[in-house]
Image (cartoon, helix red, strand yellow):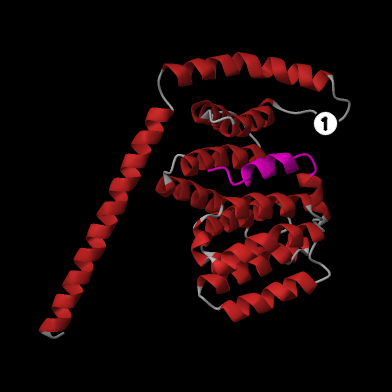
Amino acid sequence: MNTKSYVVSILMAVSLLFNACGINHKIKRENKKYTKLTSGTRYNTYKKASLKGIPIIVDKYNSSQDKYQVTENEMRAYMGFLMILAGQNRFAAAESDLILNSNHNEICHFAANNIQASIKYKKEWPHIADIQVRAQEDYFKNKYQHSPDNFGYFASELILANMNIRNLNFATAIHNFSNLAVITGVNWPQQICSILAHIQENEMSKADSEYKSLLSDKDTPDKVKKWFTPLYTTYYHHPDQLSNTKDLTTNLFKIYLKGKITTKSINSILKNTTDLLIYLYGGIR
């Protein structure tokens, strides 16, 4: 290695080291803020009240239902998402902690972790939010990598698709939705991500061609065309607006999860959790 190459290598190594130190500092700072949010009198008082109150609410709710009975953790998940919508992030975090510190099923595990990730995105702590989302994706992928026809695999692809769209990684989100299409038979989400990836790369003629294909595809629901048309017009003429993904995540996942999912086992799992999933992917930031 000559002197010039050696110096370049050293400079690159130093640059990477400084970058890593900067990211670690941000993670540490964000964790400190989240710890502050999930401690103190208000947080602990709410947890105590919830431990007493939620069982009463569940008993009253279940006594009025003939078929579907909710568990305490399912009710806590609903409460958690409602608290986020109401701007009560501390109380939402308390509900998620109560779920994770109890015996809980996978859907509640999925919900509780994403309540926490949603809080972190909303509070603009993206580094620790992404870490939590990636951990969830790894959890489901590692557990269900050999059996895609179940909730775990479905959830892991949804988690990663959501994170990639939030982070403007549209090209990668195409892959996630392609995997989901094998399960669901639904193709329009990856078509939309492909259009956005072309706009991101300033490939406007390709974006326009795929947009026309989306509109002419008989399998594209009318509600998708109605929702995406004005959004496409905005992004096409103002590509800088791609950085604002709230409307995109809110409506894409809402329409997708309320649409026709063709695999019977996924249908049966989602039957009583659709609203929960919609809260999860409702663009809460």
* Depth order, front residue of 231/180: 231
Q: Quadrant of residue 195?
A: bottom right
What residue does disc 1 label?
68
Left or right position of 167 against 36: right
- Whether residue 273 appears in magenta in the rendering, the answer is yes
Residue 14, placed above or below residue 87 = below
Specify the farthest residue to the right: 66
Q: Residue at x 15, y 78 (%)?
A: 6
Q: Residues in magenta?
A: 271-285
Residue 227 is situated, as x and y percent measured from the top left of the image, at 71, 57
Left or right position of 137 against 274: left
Q: Residue at x 78, y 39 (%)?
A: 272
Q: Residue at x 61, y 81 (%)?
A: 205
- How many numbered circles does the render carry? 1
Is residue 175 visible in the rendered structure shown here? no
Residue 263, placed above or below residue 208 = above
Residue 62 is situated, as x and y percent measured from the top left of the image, at 80, 22
Is residue 62 visible in the rendered structure shown here? yes
Specify the farthest residue to the left: 3
Residue 115 is situated, as x and y percent measured from the top left of the image, at 56, 38
Quadrant assignment for the N terminus: bottom left
Residue 283, placed above or below residue 89 = below
Specify the farthest residue to the bottom: 2
Q: Residues within 10 Å of mark 1 (few under 14, many from 20)?
A: few
